[in-house]
Amino acid sequence: MNAKRVQQVVLGSLSIATVVAFWVFLTGTGRVKPIILPPPADVLDGILDVYRGYLGVPWAEHFKASIIVMLAGYFTAIAVGVPLGIAIAWWKPIETIFSPLLAILRPIPPPAWIPLAILWFGIGLGGKAFIVFVAAVVPCIMNSYLAIKSTPPELIASARSLGASQRTLLVEVAIPSGLPAILTGMRIGLGTAWATIVAAELVVSLAGFGFLIMNGYRNLESQIVMVGMIAVAVLGYMMNWLFLVIERRLLPWGDAHD
């Protein structure tokens, strides 16, 4: 571990410790009521409650439910968004057809789709996965589009001078050149997909971190709300870290995101 990385770890740890210390101060001195911000000790009790089976649901079921919803929506977003973004950038007729539609749909926040998701896909996995899909597909489309559009003209010109076909230009020049930006869009999509998990699980869930947060809110158990939020934060961080590890393996010559 180099000196820069050590400095990042130390400063990051200090920032977290400062927030926790301020949290302990606010709750320990009675400046904030427990129902608004539970003390750390209450949150630890909440973690134990969830581990033992909050509302009769084993803790592993919450993890499994949220991960399945997120991965279903996220991988569908990749399968649709990346090829569509590339196609919009490469073929002018497709850009003419889809660009106005994307400009109209892009500003709509994912939670606004919840009523339609229920009507179209029901209250099962399909409805929840659709909300995650809506959140993740836009970054996949936009970054894939920009990746292809940003292909250096000299690369295209050099390949054409060697007799490369349009298919070869796309598959062997434009896509490899834009792969870092495409992967960045997928990583952003992963973050937005996971951040939307609570909204997705508003579509009638019996397990999951959104279920924990919403039931904690309804039962005035702020410590359970915090447990759900902490779980979402920690797992989101771990997924982003794992994606960066994979990205470094795929692009060892690229920016290491240090």
Image (cartoon, rainbow, N blue to C red):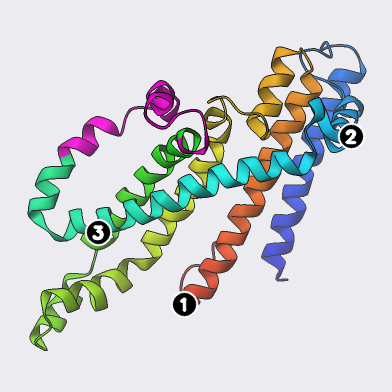
Residue in view at x 25 percent, y 59 percent: 86
Specify the farthest residue to the bottom.
Answer: 162
As helix, strand or loop, the secondary structure at mark 3 comes to: helix
Q: Label 2: few (<14), some or many (≥20) within 10 Å? A: some
Q: Amino acid at mark 1?
A: Trp
Specify the label residue 253 is tagged with. Answer: 1
For disc 2, the marked residue is 48
The residue segment tinted magenta is: 100-126
Q: Is residue 255 above or below residue 225?
A: below
Q: Is residue 67 left or right of residue 21?
A: left
Q: Estimate the x, y position of residue 201 in percent, counting from the top left.
A: 57, 30
Q: Quadrant of the C terminus?
A: bottom right
Question: In the drawing, what numbered circle is on residue 86?
Answer: 3
The local secondary structure at tag 2 comes to: helix
Q: Nearer the viewer, residue 13 or 109?
A: 109
- Image coords of residue 139 (percent x, y): 38, 46
Indicate the secondary structure of the residue bearing disc 1. Answer: loop
